[in-house]
Amino acid sequence: MTTRPTPPRTVSTITLSGLVNPHDLSADRQFSMNLARGLEVLRAFTASHPLLGNREIADRTGLPKPTVSRLTYTLVLLGYLARDPLMQKFRLGPGVLSLGHPLLASMRVRQLAKPVMEALARQTGCTVNLGVRDRGNVVYIDSVRADTSNQHLPDIGSSRPLLSSAIGRALILAGQRQERTALLNYLKVQDRELFDRFRPTWEADQKRYVAEGFCLSRGDWQKDIHAVAVPMPQGHGEAPLAMNCTLAAYRIQRDKLVREVVPLLKDAVRQIEFAQGLR
């Protein structure tokens, strides 16, 4: 009697986007390893490292240098990378920017949230941000920058680590229990030192959220920036969001964020949920 081979694991078994290691899917015939490697090359570029050579990209991605050379050559021809002929290095090209705009434009919640965020910023003097998860980070999809004394002014597309920011911890709490467990396991594997350092902060925010419904940062991500954040669960199949209010530390009167800003932030989130038909 012939036994059928066990089918390879497919992407449908992965509960949270972005947590997969491409090498774990090498036996999956539906998974394009070449595409995954090309995207890893693009992800190697950051705001602090906008210009990279093939060797630096190889070090950051763990890919062989010959593979990186072929990928950067291809990505330049397609417009996703631009080559600096003097430095013999690469930077992201306009094609990457063009990919992001359709996503932002299709997010109806951004249009619904904008006037609410602007009103909240005027009331509190805080900078107000809306974020979504990408792998182990929170990425801002909108921002009303009211606190001009904030030296770390956020921008659309900028990111923060999940565990070390109030809005990141709120995003973790926005998911179901199984999703939170999968995400925390991923963060532990990715950077055990960071996980252990912020584990007490995460556990404190878990308790705070159960008791009071918000997350708090007193300079966790940047010592001169304090923040409060609230999760915004979305409809079925849509990625959870979170909203925060941030303020330069020297501007904060005693417990102002907790006493004055948190009730207004919670009310703003409720308004957006009503506008989306989620309440």
Image (cartoon, rainbow, N blue to C red):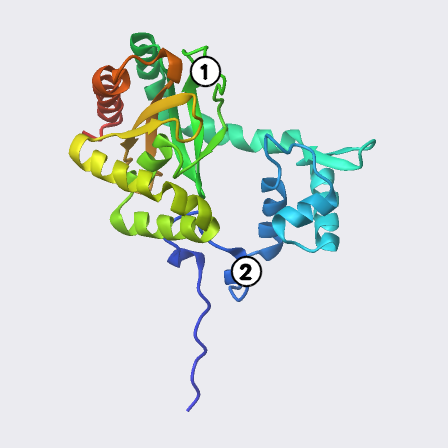
Q: Is residue 92 left or right of residue 204?
A: right
Q: Residue furthest bottom?
A: 1
Q: Quadrant of the C terminus?
A: top left
Name the kind of residue labelled 1 in the image: Asn
Q: Is residue 87 left or right of residue 123?
A: right
What secondary structure is marked by label 2? helix
Front disc: 2 or 1 = 1
According to the image, label 1 marks what residue?
150
**Residue 93 position in % (x across, y down):** 67, 31
Name the kind of residue labelled 2 in the image: His
Residue at coordinates 68% horizontally, 49% vertically from top-left? 58
Q: Quadrant of the N terminus?
A: bottom left
Q: Residue furthest top?
A: 122
- In terms of depth relative to the viewer, which is nearer, 244 or 239? 244
Quadrant of res 116: top left
**Residue 122 position in % (x across, y down):** 33, 8
**Residue 87 position in % (x across, y down):** 80, 33
What secondary structure is marked by label 1? loop
Q: Earlier in the sequence, mark 2 or mark 1?
A: 2
Residue at coordinates 34% horizontally, 33% vertically from top-left? 241
Q: Kindly identify which numbered label has been placed on residue 23.
A: 2
Q: Is residue 28 left or right of residue 73?
A: left
Quadrant of res 166: top left
**Residue 47 position in % (x across, y down):** 59, 30
- In terms of depth relative to the viewer, which is nearer, 153 or 115? 153
Within 10 Å of the Cα at label 2, are there few (<14), some (14-19), or many (20+) other Cα atoms?
A: few
Label 2 to label 1, Cα distance in Å?
41 Å
Q: Kindly identify which numbered label has been placed on residue 83.
A: none
Residue at coordinates 39% horizontally, 13% vertically from top-left? 250
